[in-house]
Image (cartoon, rainbow, N blue to C red):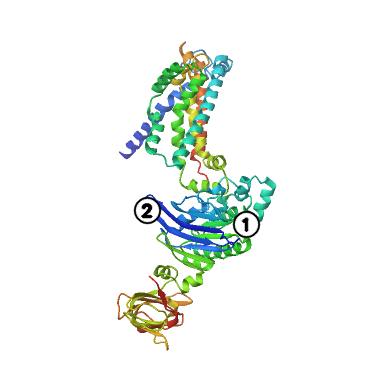
Amino acid sequence: MRRIVSVASWIYALAVYGFIFLPVVVLVLFSLQSTSFPIPPFTGPSLRWYQAVLSDTRLTSALVNSLLVAVLSSATAVTLGFLSAWGFARFVLPGSGLLRGLITLPLTVSYLIIGMGLLVLFNWAGVPKSLLAAGIGHVVINLPLCFAIIYSQMGDHQINIERAARDLGAPEWKVLLLITVPVMAPAIFAGFFLSMTFSWDEFVISFLLTRFDTTLPVEIWNLLRSGLNPKTNAVGSLVFAVSIVLVVFFELTLLRRRPA
Amino acid sequence: MSAPLVDIRDVSHRFGQHPVLKNVSLTTEAGSYTILLGPSGSGKTTLLSILGGFVTPSEGKVFIRGEDCTSVPPAKRPTTTVFQDYALFPHMSVGGNVGFGLRMQGVDGATRAARARETLALVGLDSAFDKRPHQLSGGQRQRVALARALVIEPAVLLLDEPLGALDLKLRRQMQDELKAIQKRVGTAFIHVTHDQEEAMALADHCVVMNDGRIEDEGPPERVYARPATRFSATFMGESTILAGTVMETGNRTCTVATPVGPVSLSSALPLGSAAALAIRPEHLVLGAAPGGTKLGKADVSDVVFQGSFKRVLATSVEEPSLRFIAKLPATAIVQAGDRVAISCDTDQIILLTD
């Protein structure tokens, strides 16, 4: 009986992991297909579709756009998130609890709603559809995340460290730049990499807010409209690889315990 | 230059509705070692924060070197603080920590490093220059914090329970070093503690605080031998307290009736007034002392051998609520359950004013 339960739980575990990872495995596997259709039987391995991706200027420029939007919007989100976390942690503000709730609220709103809202707003304000508009959208979704990560790591034990710096003659901006930022560096980097991950494969907002120059997920969607081929698998695998790298960086920076 | 280095005038402070300092005035002279001694909640740390500029008092003024510093921010005051948790910068080397204050003054790198090394040598840690704070022991971090605060040559160095996080042996050792360093640099130190031994060992000027007020202040020898109030008699060392009423007055003498018999004092007090008398443990004698004041009989309840002496607790037979605390030579023959006569040296009885 016990043996049956043990076997059953193994099968269950395999089924769960298979369910999660099989699509990715299939995607990556058929990106190495040497024939023109990403369907069995597997005919590879071959790198011809990766070559095709890298020689497609629309895809490569979309890749550069995506990176640019991800880096710049994450940097902005993490800077604003850090400053608001510092403000909430260090100063007594009226209605602090309510304001903290409001700043993290966008985490619960769907990207579609945020994207549509921004579309209407930009339309009204005369901001054209562009990478800048999509970048602003990414700041909107990632700022609450950066705030939450950094705020959770900003403990009282750093207050005396900041006081000591002030006591030794540091003006406020030097306290922030030379003391608080380096001490908070793990949380700041974690926020940055997580934002990068989310911005990197974000589709809805980019789709709604860009027109001619666009990001990689939108370009992949364009590609998919003309049907499946191993080239979409190859570009999907590339997106996946970059995401993995970013998540690993995130885990390393946030989870690595610095010696006290 | 007759103005005191630090002059605290009528400072009061409240946290919300709760008063933590009540009309405190205190002056400190250049080169002195002042200890603020009191239990937690006595306002001593708040007073130090007011001196450091981290708290602006609700009322009153603070003058440092004759200048009104009441609302000058910490960065612009001639004070530096050694924090209880050291508050070292974890991402900088020890040298970087010590040099930070000079860096803020715009001192160039080479001079900074040289002066940081000099100050580290002063606290006996010149070898740790390139280490990180987390590689050091508690006592070493303490010294780095001290060097970091001293390197910019403050007019007053403020220490917030600097030895509180150290174990007893290290605390006594650091205590001696603190005193030696203070004598060497000549900077005025103001040091907050709740440890009366630390206070007696370090202070030139001891300030006993309780409930937001200064109870007593002066050289530690005086505060110990002649405490001004009942609180300071029990907080700065132990005492047996006798309560009584003045029943006879003479020419600059009086006799106080206590539950254990009349006690004659060489002070003039109004007839019928209440008086509290304190007797230090080392001035109590078990058995009849010739020429001493008799304090009745007592049952010994506890004898604790402490190496160089025996600490004896005894309950008065005449007044069961009265407990005598005596300090006897280690060779004294006494044990729990003995009934003994108690007396004391008349000259050593302390008259408390409250």
Q: Is residue A3 left or right of residue A168?
A: left
| Foreground residue among A221 and B103 | B103
Q: In this view, does B278 lie to the left or right of B31?
A: left
Residue A247 visible here: no
CA separation, marks 2 and 1?
43 Å
Q: Are marks 2 and 1 in contact (CB under 8 Å)?
A: no
Q: Does residue B86 lie above or below B237 as drawn?
A: above
Dot 1: what SS? loop
Dot 2: what SS? strand
The chain carrying label 2 is B
Which amino acid lies under the numbered mark 1 shown in the image of this protein?
Answer: Leu
Q: Report the residue that reaches farthest toward the bottom.
A: B290
| Foreground residue among A75 and B321 | B321
| Foreground residue among A61 and B203 | B203
Report which residue position mark 2 lands on.
Answer: B18
Mark 1: few/some/many CA within 10 Å (<14, 14-19, 20+): some
* Residue at point 43%, 36% (across, down): A148
Which percent across, then down, holds residue B251? 41, 84
* Residue at point 39%, 38% (across, down): A96
Report which residue position mark 1 lands on.
Answer: B125
Numbered tag placed on residue B294 in the rendering: none
Q: Quadrant of the image for the C terminus of chain B?
A: bottom left
* Residue at point 41%, 17% (across, down): A120
The chain carrying label 1 is B
Which percent across, then down, holds residue A246? 51, 30
Is tag 2's residue or tag 1's residue first in the polypeptide sequence? 2
